[in-house]
């Protein structure tokens, strides 16, 4: 396939990405490889669970508000404009889940 100019590209779901590595070399990677390089866990040490709505994985300090466990936890957020939160404390591995639909949170279950 010949190279195309930026304004000639059509919309769609990518399967490969082109970029530049840390040494300035041109690279072409699969989406799986790209996702691995972008994955990281964020540490949240204050604020509220109600404000964590970006999909990803988080480590929560005990000081984070609205945490039903009030302890160190791992949080997974899945979704988009509506999403679910899965919360697991490190001490017991118990699990609680809730959803947020149209800005309204369900109860932790």
Image (cartoon, rainbow, N blue to C red):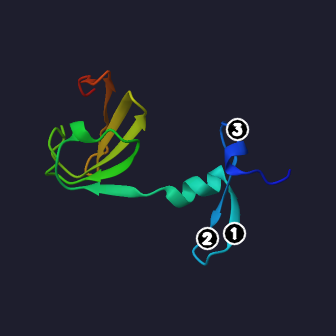
Residue at position x 35%, y 37% from top? Answer: 86
Q: State which quadrant residue 78 falls in.
A: top left
Residue drawn at point x = 38 percent, y = 27 percent:
82
Residue closer to the observer: 7 or 49: 7
**Residue, disc 3:** 10
Local secondary structure at mark 1: strand
State the CA–CA distance, disc 3 to disc 2.
Answer: 25 Å
Image height of 32 relative to 99, above or below: below
What is the CA distance from the residue labelled 1 to the residue labelled 3? 22 Å
Check the image and name the residue furthest to the right. 1
Q: Is residue 70 left or right of residue 21?
A: left
Q: In this figure, which residue is indicated by the disc labeled 1?
A: 26
The local secondary structure at tag 3 comes to loop
Picture coordinates of residue 73, whole percent (x, y): 27, 49
Q: Are marks 3 and 2 in contact (CB under 8 Å)?
A: no
Percent across and percent down for residue 42 are: 34, 56
Label 2: state its secondary structure: loop
39 vs 4, left or right, is left
Foreground disc of the pair 3, 2:
3
Dot 2, crowdedness within 10 Å: few (<14), some or many (≥20)? few
Q: Which residue is mark 2?
A: 21
Sequence order check, earlier mark of 2 and 1: 2
Q: Number of callouts in the render?
A: 3
Location of the C terminus by quadrant is top left
């Amino acid at each position: 396939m010949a190279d195309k100019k930026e304004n000639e590209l059509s919309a769609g779901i990518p399967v490969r990405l082109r970029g530049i590595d840390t040494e300035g070399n041109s690279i072409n990677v699969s989406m799986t490889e790209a996702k691995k390089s972008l994955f990281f866990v964020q540490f949240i040490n204050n604020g509220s669970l109600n404000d964590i709505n970006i999909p990803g994985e988080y480590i929560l300090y005990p000081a984070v508000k609205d945490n039903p466990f009030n302890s160190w936890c791992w949080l997974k957020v899945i979704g988009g404009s509506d999403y679910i939160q899965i919360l697991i404390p490190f001490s017991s591995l118990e699990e609680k889940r809730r959803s947020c639909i149209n800005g309204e949170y369900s109860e932790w279950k």
